[in-house]
Amino acid sequence: MEAGIEEQRGLYQKRIPIFPRSIKGKFRTFKTSMLALAYAVFFGLPWLPWSREGAPSQAVLFDLPHREFFLFNLTIYPQDLITLSLLLFIAAVLLFFVTGLVGRAFCGYFCFQTLWTDFFIFIEKWVQGERPARIRLYKQPWNGEKIVKMALTHGLWLLVAFWTGFTFIAYYAYAPHLFLAFVTGHAAGVAYATVAILTATTYVAAGLAREQVCMYMCPYARFQGVMYEPETLVVSYDIHRGEGANGRAVPHAGLKTREERTALGYGDCVDCGLCVQVCPVGIDIRQGLQYSCISCGLCIDACNTIMDSVGFPRGLVRYDSEIDIESDRPDKPHLSWRRVRTIGYGAAIAIMTSLLIYKLATRSRFVVSVEEIRAPLFDVMPNGDIRDRYQIRVTNKTATAKTYTFSVEGLPPGSLHLGEIPELTVPSGQSLMVQVGVELPHELAEETHEIHFVVTQKGPHGGSIEQHAHYFGERD
């Protein structure tokens, strides 16, 4: 090879397996609590019964064939586009707002990838043992012990992945009936295909790829930096305190107390490496802020444990801002929200949340639209009266079939002609259309420019909706 030619690199970086060590502390406790809560909600909601008239008794159900989305007592239809858009907008801005305050806290505690990876690591630890035992098992040649433990680990992973996939489709059908049909082979082909795909992707993402999903596949890791500000709280290593003038040093005779270390120019970091061992993405937080960090706080628990054992103050690794970390006299870490961007995010969330609550509180139980039939614009009847024709579409947004009646305001009785449909019964969540005519004497037609249709839902809690439409009568 000629001199000066650079060594070729592979297209993909080879994955180095990471075996996180278990640790105790408030951040580990919080992560475990969020894991338990998320799993209880995700796996439990499809099986939670909920009394509902005219629909399956399932608390959360997305009924795509009938275009109905049931969330406890709330029923949402595709016509509620503004409501769905507001929900997505609030979720997105809330993510930006939280990132501006505490960095990638969403990734560390609430992201599906983190939650499932965490549980898969729990399974791995339960089967194979703590970090040293897992490393030993990984390096040892294949034998009976390794085959049994690896087979059990991957078998449990696949079981969790399968139940994850099945739970996902259980949100789209009545779960008890779906389960019976699925295990007896009578479910739709798309159900088996969806479960197979989700089982495979969950197994690969949480069991095999793990941190590579966060580092290379997730777009959030790439654009999060533009949402950080110097005041943003992120997991940070206090380099001034930890390194001192001469860097880190393992405690030994003459370097065990803070006074001895300070006198010799060494920092508080005892270079134990525990912060690296507990990190689920395998980074060294002492190298500064890195895009791979998911802000889970486990390195804080690890460092605090070591600081307690050597008698040093906690907080060498902590949630803190860039301003404080670089300061010679850092303040106590605190949330700093008095910033234009953060206030803007907060105001947007407050406004959109208020609008969403208003839309839900005032949402009608049905929707009416009126369209003029313009071919022809009007008809001249044999007696000289003028008739305009209209299409009235009624969408029933309740959970049961409803009946609707039609009338017009401010016009003589008999002006509205409904043909053979005096009233319209619309099934739950569907839309039906009826054609009507408005017939007026020639003199009144010349004076009328707008028709006020009134559609009334019969029964208790019915209500009425008024819609206006142009009247194209004959003009002189």
Image (cartoon, rainbow, N blue to C red):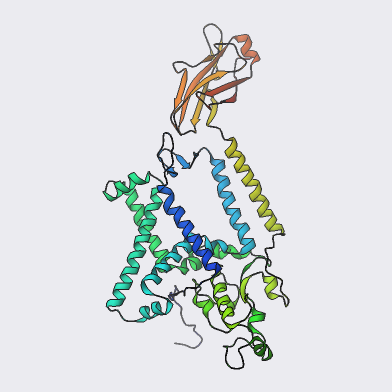
Name the residue located 54 percent from the left edge and 75 percent from the top edge. 302
Where residue 103 appears, x then y in whole percent? Answer: 60, 64
Who is closer to the viewer here, 345 or 148?
Answer: 148
The quarter in which the C terminus is drawn is top right
Q: Is residue 390 left or right of residue 347?
A: left
The quarter in which the N terminus is drawn is bottom left
Q: How many marks?
A: 0
Name the residue located 68 percent from the left edge and 54 percent from the top edge. 344
- 473 vs 205: above or below: above
Where residue 404 appears, x then y in whole percent? Answer: 49, 23
Where residue 213 appears, x then y in whole percent? Answer: 47, 66
Can residue 296 be seen in the rendering of this structure?
A: no
Who is closer to the viewer here, 44 or 215?
Answer: 44
Specify the quadrant of the image occupied by residue 285. bottom right
Who is closer to the viewer here, 441 or 299?
Answer: 299
Name the residue located 38 percent from the left edge and 81 percent from the top edge. 136
